[in-house]
């Protein structure tokens, strides 16, 4: 298995290449569930140029234990989510275009595609507004995650997805962005998207979590 530093760096490159963020914005972290250590992207660095030494590592108490770079300004969001949500081991904050449109409009995104039901499992709402990098924004975001959401819009800002690991969180970010685009375009046609009933969403989410894909060897 690659190091957690590498997992974070590769996710950053992918986020940048898939245009899920703009320039150096957005941030990514992973938690090692065995040690509780959190690996976070540095502030304002090009994802393509990040190396293992640029990743900032915090222990389970939130104390920096490795890395000389200034951490992402949203470190409080990442650390608070891990502290309060034991099942979360990856957090990705994007500035993706269509997710940002809904965040700016302060709209919730209902479950409108099956992959959305499978990867996110419930509607995505907007958190309350707070200025980036503040403890208050961390509080607002963490509260939505504690309420059981796996993704959230940040008003005037972007989106954030969590997962049990980086693959799960990354899939959620991609699916969210596509669903946001589909939603906006259906609305732009003057039509109403079909919202998948809650019972079906629950069924698909459980199936995807437990049975979809190839069993691990
Ligand atoms: Zn941001």
Image: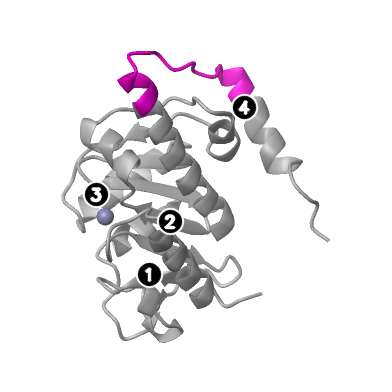
Q: Quadrant of residue 56?
A: bottom left
Is the residue under label 4 in contact with that under label 1 (CB below 8 Å)?
A: no
Relative image position of residue 79 (x, y in whole percent): 38, 61
Picture residue at 36% right of the left edge, 75% below the top: 63
Picture residue at 80% right of the left edge, 52% below the top: 215
Labelled disc at residue 202: 4
- Position of 41 with respect to 216 (left or right) is left
Nearer mark to the viewer, of 2 and 4: 2
Badge 1 crowding class, 10 Å Cα cut-off, few under 14, some 14 to 19, many 20 or more, is some
Instruction: State yes or no: residue 187 in magenta.
Output: yes
Query: Toward the viewer: 211 or 131?
Result: 211
CA separation in Å, label 3 and label 2? 26 Å
Badge 3 crowding class, 10 Å Cα cut-off, few under 14, some 14 to 19, many 20 or more, is many
Mark nearer the N terminus (2 vs 4):
2
Relative image position of residue 166 (x, y in whole percent): 54, 59
Mark 1, residue position: 62
| Secondary structure found at label 3 | helix
Mark 2, residue position: 18
Mark 3, residue position: 137
Visible residue check, residue 211 = yes
CA separation in Å, label 1 and label 4? 34 Å
Q: Ligand 1 appears in which quadrant? A: bottom left
Mark nearer the N terminus (1 vs 4):
1
CA separation in Å, label 1 and label 3? 17 Å
| Secondary structure found at label 2 | loop
Which region shows up in magenta? 185-201
């Amino acid at each position: 298995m690659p190091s957690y530093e590498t997992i974070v760096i590769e996710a950053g490159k992918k986020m940048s290449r898939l245009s899920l963020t703009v320039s150096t914005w957005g941030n990514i972290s992973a938690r090692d569930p065995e040690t509780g250590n959190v690996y976070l992207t540095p502030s304002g660095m090009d994802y393509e140029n990040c190396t293992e030494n640029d990743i900032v590592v915090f222990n389970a108490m939130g104390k920096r234990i490795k890395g000389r770079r200034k951490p992402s300004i949203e470190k409080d969001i990442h650390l608070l989510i891990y502290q309060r949500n034991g099942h979360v081991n990856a957090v990705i904050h994007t500035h993706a275009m269509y997710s940002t449109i809904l965040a700016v409009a302060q709209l919730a995104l209902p479950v409108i595609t099956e992959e959305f039901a499978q990867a996110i499992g419930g509607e995505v709402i907007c958190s309350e507004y707070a200025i980036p990098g503040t403890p208050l924004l961390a509080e607002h975001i963490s509260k939505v995650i504690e309420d059981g959401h796996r993704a959230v819009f940040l008003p005037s800002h972007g989106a954030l997805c969590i997962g049990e690991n980086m693959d799960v969180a990354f899939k959620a970010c991609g699916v969210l962005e596509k669903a946001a685009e589909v939603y906006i375009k259906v609305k732009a046609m003057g039509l109403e998207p079909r919202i998948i009933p809650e019972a079906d969403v629950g069924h698909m989410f459980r199936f995807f979590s437990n049975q979809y894909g190839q069993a691990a060897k």
